[in-house]
Image (cartoon, helix red, strand yellow):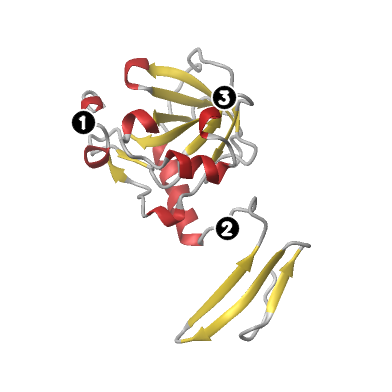
């Protein structure tokens, strides 16, 4: 890691198009301004840490062969906390309730339960998720990863970091809706469509 000493008003340039400026220093805090292309995702470290932990917690490790599924979606950068897993095959888990089991092609024991956001979470900011992913709403499906603990504790939904899936290109990206106030571990009983909760 490079370490720099900077004063207020001074900057650091990364590559040709990312610039970090020290805006203010005081009270034990440093305020930074970041100038970068729109395509570059910028997130606070603690938010990324929370999402990585939730993705790890959501893994439904299962031995045995992967179930039959559709054609894989490619996540070029992987998922937070699961960067080595770039291809996931969606398998029908419960078509009536719009649930899919996403199975990693790299390791079939890594499986994530994904709920269709439009069906499961009324009022979910679908357009914001698609905008963050750079895809049109008409071309995309937005999914939310569910954590379903095996110990009987309440399932939760990672509303903060949805999966945006392009049906045309069979690609996906996990985006962060940082300014939304959404939770990375929202109790399912509080946020989901009540009609879909039976049996989860």
Which residue is found at the position 30% from the left and 45% from the top?
186
Q: How many marks?
A: 3
Looking at this view, is 37 or 74 the one in front?
37
Q: Residue furthest right?
A: 16
- Looking at the image, the residue that sits furthest to the top is 68
Q: Is residue 14 above or below residue 135?
A: below
Residue ID for mark 1: 194
Label 3, on which residue?
A: 167
Residue shown at 67%/75% (left/top)? 3
Task: Say which residue label 2 marks.
Answer: 42
Q: Are marks 3 and 1 in contact (CB under 8 Å)?
A: no
Q: CA distance from mark 3 to mark 1?
A: 28 Å
SS of the residue at dot 3? loop
Residue 101, percent across and down? 44, 24
Q: In the picture provided, is 15 more to the left or to the right than 170?
A: right
The residue carrying pointer 3 sits among few (fewer than 14), some (14 to 19) or many (20 or more) residues within 10 Å by Cα, namely few
**Up/down of 154 relative to 168, above or below:** below
Residue drawn at the location 22% of the way across and 42% of the way down: 190
- Which quadrant of the figure contains the N terminus? bottom right
């Amino acid at each position: 890691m490079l370490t720099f000493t900077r004063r207020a008003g001074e900057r650091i340039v990364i590559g040709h198009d990312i610039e970090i400026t020290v805006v203010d220093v005081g009270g034990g805090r440093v305020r930074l301004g970041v100038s970068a292309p729109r395509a570059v995702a910028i997130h606070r470290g603690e938010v990324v840490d929370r999402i990585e932990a939730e993705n790890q917690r959501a893994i439904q490790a299962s031995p045995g062969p992967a179930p039959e599924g559709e054609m894989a979606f490619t996540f070029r950068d992987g998922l937070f906390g699961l960067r080595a897993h770039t291809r996931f095959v969606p398998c029908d888990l419960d078509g009536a309730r719009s649930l899919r089991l996403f199975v990693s092609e790299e390791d079939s024991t890594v499986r994530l339960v994904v709920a269709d956001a439009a069906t499961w979470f009324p009022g979910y900011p679908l357009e914001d998720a698609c905008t963050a992913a750079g895809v049109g709403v008409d071309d995309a499906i937005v999914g939310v990863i569910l954590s379903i603990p095996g110990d009987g504790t309440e399932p939760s939904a990672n509303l903060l970091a949805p999966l945006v899936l392009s049906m045309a290109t069979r690609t996906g990206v996990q985006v962060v809706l940082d300014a939304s106030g959404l939770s990375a571990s929202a109790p399912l009983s509080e946020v989901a469509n009540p009609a879909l909760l039976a049996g989860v």
